[in-house]
Image (cartoon, rainbow, N blue to C red):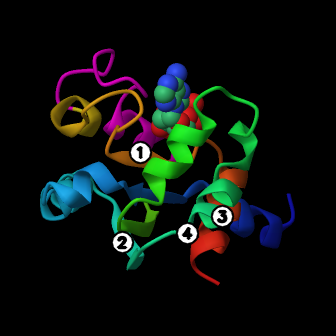
Amino acid sequence: MNVFIRFAKKIMDNKTFMMIKPDAVERGLIGKILADIIDAGFQIIELKMVKLSLNEAKRFYKVHKDRPFFNDLTAYMSRSTIVAAVLLKENAVNDFRKLIGSTDPSDAEEGTIRKKYAISKGENSVHGSDSNENAEIESNFHFS
Ligand code: DAT
Ligand code: MG
């Protein structure tokens, strides 16, 4: 394989995008969650606090626009400040999804961020990209 393509693939494999959602920011959990992420071996390369408008939340979650929970999800994601970050680690997307656990905290494994902190399937404290492609799209949404 061309050396440049190999290099580009390696970078892509190493990056994910995450958010600390309103329920967790509101309960003072930013420090604890970032500590869990750093302790798991992720390097934070971009980080900011931001309040999304309802329209921005709708744009970010547009893949879910036809789902019954879309209105609740976007109202919740725009109700107060979030933290957005880009993280580096080998196998970042999959390892981060493992670290946060299942969407519904009652299904999440012991020790995962959602098991420890999430309130419900809707208010589940953290977001993690589900593919390299979406990591790129979501990073650009917040940092460009
Ligand atoms: P994930 O965040 O684990 O990738 P997802 O992409 O399927 O989950 O859904 C995005 C968010 O939407 C999820 O974090 C919480 C909310 N959500 C998903 N399914 C839901 C449901 N059945 N009821 C309420 N909220 C839901
Ligand atoms: Mg998802």
Is mark 3 in CB contact (under 8 Å) with mark 4? yes
Q: Is residue 12 visible?
A: no
Which residue is under mark 2? 44
In the image, the residue with mark 2 has its CB under 8 Å from the nearest atom of ligand 1: no
- How many marks can you see? 4
Quarter of the image where the C terminus is located: bottom right
In the image, the residue with mark 1 has its CB under 8 Å from the nearest atom of ligand 1: no
Which residue is under mark 4? 53
Specify the quadrant of the image occupied by residue 11. bottom right
Q: Percent x, y for residue 115?
A: 22, 29
Which residue is under mark 1? 96
Is mark 1 in CB contact (under 8 Å) with mark 3? no
Which residue is under mark 3? 55
Identity of the residue drawn at 45% across and 57% down: 18
Pointer 2: residues within 10 angstroms few (<14), some, or many (20+)?
A: some
Identity of the residue drawn at 86% across and 65% down: 2
Disc 1 marks a residue whose amino acid type is Phe
Disc 4 marks a residue whose amino acid type is Ser
Is 109 above or below relative to 32? above
Q: Nearer the viewer, residue 55 or 44?
A: 55
- The residues bearing labels 3 and 4 have C-alpha atoms spaced at a distance of 5 Å
In the image, the residue with mark 3 has its CB under 8 Å from the nearest atom of ligand 1: no
Q: Percent x, y for residue 6?
A: 75, 62
The range drawn in magenta is: 92-111
Q: Mark 1 falls on what kind of element? A: helix
Disc 2 marks a residue whose amino acid type is Ile
- The residues bearing labels 2 and 4 have C-alpha atoms spaced at a distance of 25 Å
Closer to the chain start, of discs 1 and 2, is 2
Q: Mark 2 falls on what kind of element? A: strand
